[in-house]
Amino acid sequence: MESFFLGLSNLLNIHVIIAILIGAVGGVIIGAIPGIGPAIAIAILLPATIFLEDLVSLVLLLGIYGSAMYGGAIPAILINTPGTPVNALTTYDGYSMTKNGDAPRALSLAYSSSFFGGCFSITVALICLIAFGPYLRDFGALFGQRDIFMAAALGSVLLILAHRQNMAIAAMLFAIGFLISMVGRQTSRGVARYTFDIEYLASGFNLIVVIVGIFALSQALNLMNGKDTDPPETKITKGLFKGLAELKKYPAVAFISAFFGTVMGIIPGVGEFVAQFFSYSTARSLSKTPSKFGYGAPEGLIACETSNNAVPAAAMIPLLALGVPGEALTAMMMIVFFDAGIKPGPDIFEKAPDFLFSLFLALLIINILVVITLLFTSKFIAKIIYIPNRFLGAFIMILAFVGVFSIRNNFMDCAFAAGFGLLGYILRRLNWPLVPIVLGMVLGSIMIEKLTAGAGKIKFWMDLFNRPVSGILALTIFLVIFLTLISYIYSYYKKNIR
Amino acid sequence: MKSNFSENQKFLCSDKVRLFDASITPKQFKSRISKERKFKVENLFEFKRITGDLTLSIIFLLFVVFLLIYFNSESGWSARDLNQKRVGKILKQQWVGPLMCMAILLPATILNILEAFKAYKKSKRLLLPNKIIYEMTQWIRSLEFILYFLVYTFSITVLGYLISTLIFAVFLTYRLGYRTKKWIFISLFSSFIVVLIFRTILQIKTPVNIWLYKFFPENLEVFMKIYF
């Protein structure tokens, strides 16, 4: 409990409070603008956070991460365009409710569901920290270098398998990201890898350069080369508080969706989409009127928004506990941790437990602030969604320069970011996933770092798996791959032979 | 309600021809497929290989072949030392990382090109339109904006962050078709705010040795260097 109060007192700092406010309100606005999304905002803001205090920068990014999905629901419900990619499923029932003249009800239902989902996963994380705090300190001793290597390997496997319909592409892009992280002169040995005698490549690719290129510049190109949409004007009439209490009518859907969101958030590489899939399917099977799903069912909206917002807090758990990010946004946050000199991983429970409490408490405050802001300012925020896409693209490009140049004051960084932007743009056009490249860079470098650090204790190949944790993780990798293969064979049999 | 049909369409809908009854509105037309079957949540995860997929897959394959050719010299494989008693000493060598990458990259690329080719053959069989020239044009078209971005980047050393950003924002706004005074003012104002937030308040690093600033009076030069 001492750490809890210490964590709370860390938040009583004017800079942290301002970061909470900017993160919460900024995140909602960013989420509400179709075409930006938290990944782009965080990519652009990352270099700026280097100059801020560690807790301030993390709270700011967490605020954007945690509140963007609230904002993303607004255009999804009002104009049938998801603000962030994860709000895509919200359009099915949310927009249908708007068409039926129930826009305020849909919005307030989305806010209350998001709030419930967010609070659920934060509460779970806080309870775990308070209840198991003393034991979690010993948890660090269980994890050696080889165990974290295996955890990163499991994360990589899950990430690739999560792209079920385009697994080959995901694996290919993951490996390319992994290879990008290998480029440069190895500091310990001074031997260059894939530098082709180019001086710039000797120091390797900076992760932020790749992230800004792949996420921000590619989206800027995408928007500028696209067409402006002309969304229908929808006015929010009174009654935003109407749907708040409606959540109580569907407790089972809310709890199940929040549970799925929390569990899927913890599993690296899985995230919001799979959480939504399970929540939505379960909500439909539980419903007395499944035919309404996709046509304005409140349970459908609750399932999507609750599971979405349960993910951010849960996604922080593998990052903090193992130092293994499960998705692009947490991978970006890892950079802030490194800059702050805090190494996320099992040791963090012993070295900085108050820091963990501060993060989760800040996220809780952000959730409360966001709901209050949205209930009173939805009418104004709804106007933001009408900013033309192409104009937005131009400004993302301007902001991308700040993101790239400020890291090392190097023009070559800008040129390479532009190159990655072009690659990202082509991938976006073909619907190829971008996240595996970034996670390949992060997880790949973790794997190599841990493997090299733990190599001294490896005499035989089996030594890689002979620790309890690494053994269990290796077995899990094997089982996951085996089960996927079985399901593939089964579906092939069902499709072609029967 | 006024009819928008052309004379030819009116003739086709007339009693003499009776090809279809134009009096039926879309609302009256009811699908026999039940609502549950029409909407599937699985559609959210649907991935379809579209025009350009095969081209990009081929580019990736060529890139992987290129990496393979240089694997020996660029990954450190040429300096390998496999005669070690401890496996750990092998795992510490610098080629291990690139080898792990290639172990994933090579099969994945081959699998991807096979799938892309299969999808291409299917689209040919179904006579689906394949606008590859159009797609490639779109890829090349984006180079225009990349060029602008690079020019903007280099212009900062000449004109300074503030002036370059204002010019670039107005130029891009104009180029994208927002040519009214209102949009030009919005872009000027927004870009000024961007500079104010990132350079003046957050003190983000931008180039310092600006050619234009050298012509300013000393006090103004120092002020501009610090804040803009």
Image (cartoon, coloured by chain):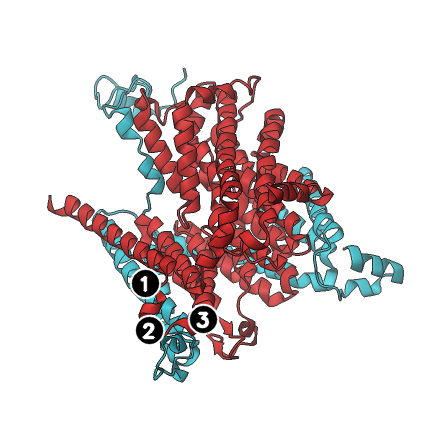
Which mark's residue is nearer the viewer, 3 or 2? 2
Could you tell me residue A471's position as x and y percent? 33, 59
Could you tell me residue A1's position as x and y percent? 59, 41
Could you tell me residue A488's position as x and y percent? 22, 50
Which of disc 2 and disc 3 is earlier in sequence? 3
Q: Indicate whether A266 appears above or below A173.
A: above
Q: On the picture, is A381 further left or further right than A243? A: right
Q: Give the residue number, with chain letter if any, for mark 3.
A: A452
Q: CA distance from mark 2 to mark 1?
A: 31 Å
Q: Indicate whether B139 appears above or below A96.
A: below
- Chain B, colour shown: cyan
Circle 1: residue type: Thr
Secondary structure type for disc 1: helix
Could you tell me residue A224's position as x and y percent? 53, 48
Secondary structure type for disc 2: loop
Q: Indicate whether A84 appears above or below A209.
A: above
Mark 2 falls within which chain? A
Secondary structure type for disc 3: helix
Q: Which chain is red?
A: A
Q: Give the residue number, with chain letter if any, for mark 2.
A: A460
- Residue at the far left in the pictured view: A498
Mark 1, residues whose alpha carbon is within 10 Å: few (<14), some, or many (≥20)? many
Marker count (numbered): 3
Mark 2, residues whose alpha carbon is within 10 Å: few (<14), some, or many (≥20)? few
Q: Give the residue number, with chain letter if any, for mark 1.
A: B109
Q: Nearer the viewer, residue A166 or A386?
A: A166
